[in-house]
Amino acid sequence: MKAIFIRRYGGPEVLEYGEFSDPVVGSGDVLIKVAAAAINPIDIMERSGLTKDFKPVSFPGVLGWDLSGTVVGVGPSVVGFSIGDKVLAWAYHTYAELCVVKAGLLAKVPDSLDLVEAAALPLVTTTGNQLVSVAAEIKPGQTVLVAGAFGGVGSSAAFTAKELGARVIAGVLEKQFAAARRLGADQVVALDDEDALNALAPVDAVANTVRGKTAEQLLGKVKPGGMFASVTGAPANANDYPSVRVVSYVFAPGRQDSPRHGPGCELGETCDPDRTKVASQRRPRGP
C-alpha cells in the first residue's frame, strides 16, 4: 500500500510518501480503506520526537490517529461491521491507504455526514467526552465552565456536560460569542473580556483546553473542593489553590474507566448532527 511515514524525527521534511507493508488483520480487527486522515497536534509532537521518551516511533513508522473510510475486510469474531460499511475511528497509523482497527473503536458514519469530514471527529470529540465524564467527574446539577468551548475538544466537552445534566458555561473568544450560542450552553462568557471574566461566579468545575494566563485566571474561579480538569497541563499557579483538585488529563480511545465506555459508544456519539457542526470544521487530509 501507499503511506506517509518517517524514518527519523524532525520537521515536515522527514515525511516520506511511498510503498509500505500492508497491515495484518487479526481477531477482532477490521480493515479500513482510508478515505481521509486528520492531522492533530499529537502527530506533530510524535514526528518531531517530543514524545519519544514515553511513546517512541518504531522506524520506519506511519503516524496519524484519526480516520474515516470504508470497511474492506473483517477478522474473526467481528460483529456489527460488514464489508462496505462507512466508518470513522480513533486508531493509529492512519496516514495510509489501509489501516487495521479494533472493531470496538469503530463507529458507522451516517449518510447525513460527509465521509471525508468525518475524519476530523474521532480524537477531538472523544477527548472532549472523556475530559468531562472521566477527568472532571461532572455530576447532574453541577456548574461547569468549558474553556475553549468553540474548538473541537471543547465543543464535545460542552455537549457531554449537558447530557450529564450539568449547567454549562461556554468559555470562548469574544469574536466567537454569537456563533457559540449554537452549542446549547446555559451561558456564554468571553474569556478575553476581563470584566466578564471577573464578574463570573465560582463554578464547581472547569473543563480546560486553553493555556497561559487565561487558564490561571479560570483556576481561581473554581470553588474550594472543586475540579480543574485540563488537557493542556496544570496552570502555572496550581500550587496557589490547594483546595482545588487539578487533573492533567491524558486521553485514550475506549478507556475502561469511562462511563461511556463500550464498543463504539463514545465514537457513536460523535456522529450526532449537533456535535459535528463545530468539530467537522477541521479539514482532514486525504490519503
Image (tube, rainbow, N blue to C red):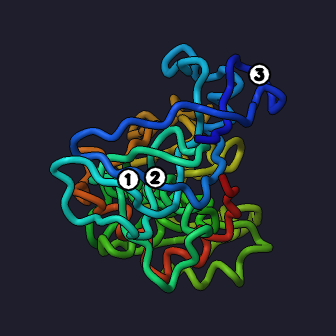
Marks 1 and 2 close (CB-CB < 8 Å): yes
Q: Is residue 151 above or below residue 243?
A: below
Q: Earlier in the sequence, mark 3 or mark 1?
A: 3
CA gap between label 1 and label 2 equals 5 Å
User: Which residue matches tag 2?
Assistant: 127
**How many C-alpha atoms fall within 10 Å of the one at disc 2: few (<14), some, or many (≥20)?**
many
Q: Is residue 84 above or below residue 204?
A: below
Task: Please tell me whether mark 2 sits on a helix, a strand or a loop.
Answer: helix
Label for residue 56? none
Marks 3 and 1 close (CB-CB < 8 Å): no
Task: Please tell me whether mark 1 sits on a helix, a strand or a loop.
Answer: helix
Q: Quarter of the image holding residue 138?
A: bottom left
User: Which residue matches tag 3?
Assistant: 10
CA gap between label 2 and label 3 equals 26 Å
Label for residue 130? 1
**How many C-alpha atoms fall within 10 Å of the one at disc 1: few (<14), some, or many (≥20)?**
many
Q: Quarter of the image holding residue 64?
A: top right
Q: Amino acid at mark 2?
A: Thr
Task: Please tell me whether mark 3 sits on a helix, a strand or a loop.
Answer: loop
Residue at x 61% of width, y 66% of height: 171
- Looking at the image, is mark 3 or mark 1 nearer the viewer? 3
